[in-house]
Image: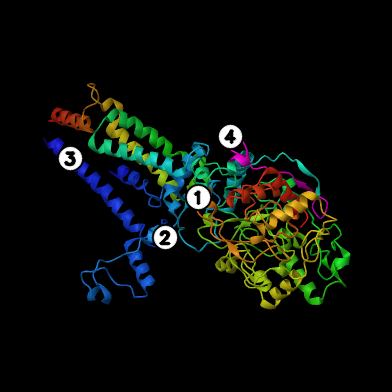
Amino acid sequence: MLFFYFGFLKFYPDLSPAELIAGQTLTKLLLNWSEVRATLAVLAILECGIGAALVLNLMPRTTFVLFLVHMAGTFLPLFLLPEFTFKIAPFAPTLEGQYILKNLVFVAAAWTVLRPEKFSDAGGTTPVGQSVIDEKAKSDRGSS
Amino acid sequence: MKVVLTKVMLALVLIGLGVGINVTYESYRGTGLSSVPELGPRRLEAAQSQASGSPVQSRSEPSSKEAARPDAPVVRPDLAALRSAAVSELTLYPTLAKGMRTPFDLWRYYGRGVSSFSSPILPMRFEQWLEFHRKQKPSLMKDVRSYMAMRFDFSGSTLPDATMSGGKSVMAGPVARLSDEVASYEALAELTPEEVRERDLFPYKPLAHPLQTVAHMVFPESWIKVHPEHRRIDVDMDFPDAYLPEFPPPLFLTTHKELGDVANGREVTIDNYYEIFDGLLTPEQMEGLKELLRPSPTTWFNHTDHRVTELPSRGVACFDCHVNGHTNGAFELGPDSRPNMARLRTDTPTMRGNFNLMQLSSKRSIRSMDHFSEVEEYFDGDPGMQQAIGPRAVKREVTNRMGDFNAILDYPPAPKLDPLMRLVPAKATKAALRGEALFHGKAQCSKCHSGPAFVDDYMHDLQVERFYVGRPEGPIKTFPLRGIKDSPPYLHDGRCPTLHDTVEFFNLVLQLKLTEQEKDDLVAYLLCL
């Protein structure tokens, strides 16, 4: 839900607090080739897509891969814009740096819920987290 | 069933979230907080009331006129239509912090800044600021050079037998590159403004500061060689020296015409001014000159961390850009607009002949040289920054004296002109004489460029945005043409690097349909002024 929320904000100029750092990272990544607003719109579409797919459990395997790719991208400002993400690199991040580093929590949470071995063999249609619930129920039955 | 219901509920929450954000944005951009200067409902009402002279009323309360005729339809003027039609084609300025790169085509953008007020604080620690620019500057300058090479052909070819007053060659043109879609400038001039705009063919779009988030003064290489203390960590000059005024330029005084170049080929500095001018100036003028030569802290050249030099800087003196009362081609941004990215790039104008001007400054219509000396330029039009970085005030008596010296800086000699500023036929070439006739006739130059300084002292809106999709620049002060060959590049932002480019620019903008021969004749005439 947060993914969708923060992603949707990026469609609107001046609403997202991540606009500056995300826009600059993408501009650097694309070697100043594209326009900031256009790249932010693509990022917004990606984030909203991932967010909606996670919430509605659509194509979890693809979503999980996209999610990991996106998460890897969110760490790029630490390397491309260290002046804005670290007060003193590499152990004293700025607020923006902390905002990025907290994504590790997202990655850990997603890995716990969505890691590949939890997908069903039948095309990845098991609801998100269902495999975890199933395992929990199985172990509960076993212990009783 | 339960799963489906859950999914539907979640989908509704997502849609609600999206709608909520959209509604928030719509109300946000109608307020003064927004970066989008749309006319929201409240502003529309306020503007309407202002236009009709009545106090602001809510929509539910009709005015007394409306109350008298309850059936009369309420006519609301379409205020949005009063703005430039091009606004719908423009893009909002990107959100950027100090130091970050800005688009070179800033004319395509518009919008409101977060605030009119600035701050003397960097977005990072100074060591990081240095490191940031150490990394960014090489790639920025590489792109700046590519961009300038894409727009101009700086081949280095010069006009035969044409020199500035101090002997530097005058560059040949036009050097602005044409699109492959048009064969020549004459072919381009045959098109209507709409066609030029539609096909994106206009070669004289505005020039932006290469790093507009910081902006401020950028000095030419010829100056930096002598004054390395003004080398910036973030950006360098984008014009080759050959296309800029000579350095150091001659200095002429109205009070000592017999001396010619009073500086005798030297740069006047605070160290040598007394030796050069003692016995030639009044004590008051001498005091004014000293002040024009005394460095003073500026927004980005100072002793604080909020600077663009590696080492702390003593600042910048008036004569660091207006070298010897002329110009070295340094540019900065006009301080008269906000946000920072809306400020127009401004080349240093010469101070020669300022005594003849009734209006100074490209946009601000400054009416006296004393005011011109006093005006807040070094701090980008932000007295708050002046208070933070200093100096805190300039006394009126001092600026008056600066104005006193400013008032005796003369134009360079123009031996081919008579006292009424017409060419002496025996001294001028046939081409120059034909050019003079064009100047006062078909080319219509004299409509704005007339009198002893070839200036009308008005601001004009050339409506150049008719030829490209861009933010209108509005009225800009006419520049005097006396001694014009000494002051390239031309137009307020230097988008016309040579006299030929300037003639091509006006041929297009005023739709004059000049022939190639006529354009050469006009240039021959301008070289005589």
Which is more N-terminal, label 2 or label 1?
Answer: 2
Which is more N-terminal, label 3 or label 4?
Answer: 3
Image x and y of residue B143, in percent: 60, 40
Q: Which subunit holds the residue at mark 3? A: B
Asked if marks 1 and 2 fall on the same chain, the answer is yes
Image x and y of residue A142, in percent: 15, 27
Q: Which subunit holds the residue at mark 4? A: B
**Residue at image mark 3:** B8
| Mark in front: 4 vs 3 | 4
User: In the rendered structure, which amino acid carries the disc numbered 3?
Assistant: Val
User: Dot 3: what SS?
Assistant: helix
In the rendered structure, does residue B169 fall within the stretch colored magenta? yes
Which is more N-terminal, label 2 or label 4?
Answer: 2
User: Dot 1: what SS?
Assistant: loop
**Residue at image mark 4:** B180
Which is more N-terminal, label 3 or label 2?
Answer: 3
**Residue at image mark 1:** B470
**Residue at image mark 2:** B82
| Mark in front: 1 vs 2 | 2
Residue sitting nearer the eye, A28 or B123: A28
- Whether the residues at callouts 1 and 4 have beta carbons within 8 Å, the answer is no
Q: Residues within 10 Å of mark 3 (few under 14, many from 20)?
A: few
Which is more N-terminal, label 1 or label 3?
Answer: 3
In the picture, which quadrant includes the C terminus of chain B? bottom right
- Whether the residues at callouts 4 and 3 have beta carbons within 8 Å, the answer is no
- Whether the residues at callouts 2 and 3 have beta carbons within 8 Å, the answer is no
The Cα–Cα distance between marks 2 and 3, rounded to whole angstroms, is: 46 Å
The Cα–Cα distance between marks 1 and 2, rounded to whole angstroms, is: 16 Å
The Cα–Cα distance between marks 3 and 1, rounded to whole angstroms, is: 46 Å
